[in-house]
Amino acid sequence: METVTELVTPILEKQNFELVEVEFVKEGRDWFLRVFIDKEGGIDILDCALVSEQLDEKLDAMDPDPIPQAYFLEVSSPGAERPLKKESDYEKAVGEYIHVSLYQTIDGEKQFEGILKTVDKDQLTLTVKIKTRVKDYTFERKNIAKARLAIQF
């Protein structure tokens, strides 16, 4: 993943795109190298095709091949429920509706959705609506397994 990140970063910087995540996963019998990218206003199919073509060329030119097995390269948008990975992701999400999964339960729950009220390097505060009540929960960042933007219904 480090090699792919190093290869794709200059391509993205040239286009003012942001690298959200790189993953290499096996699904069934097939391997997938997925690169999630974003930009202000969102990524479209032409942006994905441009990055895919350039990254594919760079990967093919490497000797030895950093990924010896066969795989499918997918470049895409992180979608409406974009994961929050970097500190800047959390900072941009203040005031947004997010989903948080925890390692340890709080009030018998491991998953919460609400408005991200505050965030710092150690914790974040989420305003959660539970039936007719509104309650602020503060989570230690080290207890957060995953966080992502969420769609509020």
Image (cartoon, grey):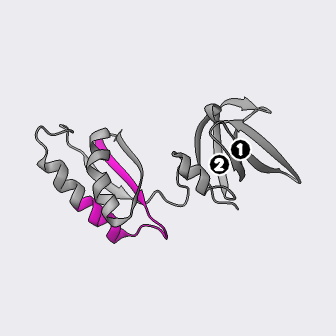
- Lower sequence index among marks 1 and 2: 2
Q: Position of residue 75 (x, y in %)?
A: 34, 57
Amino acid type at mark 2: His
Give me the residue at 10% from left, 40% from top.
63
Q: Position of residue 88 (x, y in %)?
A: 54, 51
Give me the residue at 24% from left, 45% from top.
71
Q: Tell me whether the residue at label 1 lies in contact with that at label 2, contact meaning CB atoms closer than 8 angstroms.
A: yes
Look at the image and tell me whether residue 114 can be seen: no
Instruction: Provide the residue designation for mark 2.
Output: 99
Q: Quadrant of residue 36?
A: bottom left
User: How dense is the environment of label 1, judged by Cα within 10 Å: few (below 14), some, or many (20 and up)?
Assistant: some
Can residue 33 be found in the magenta stretch? yes
Disc 1, SS? strand
Q: Which mark is residue 112?
A: 1
Stretch of the chain drawn in magenta: 29-53
Tell me the CA gap for discs 1 and 2: 6 Å
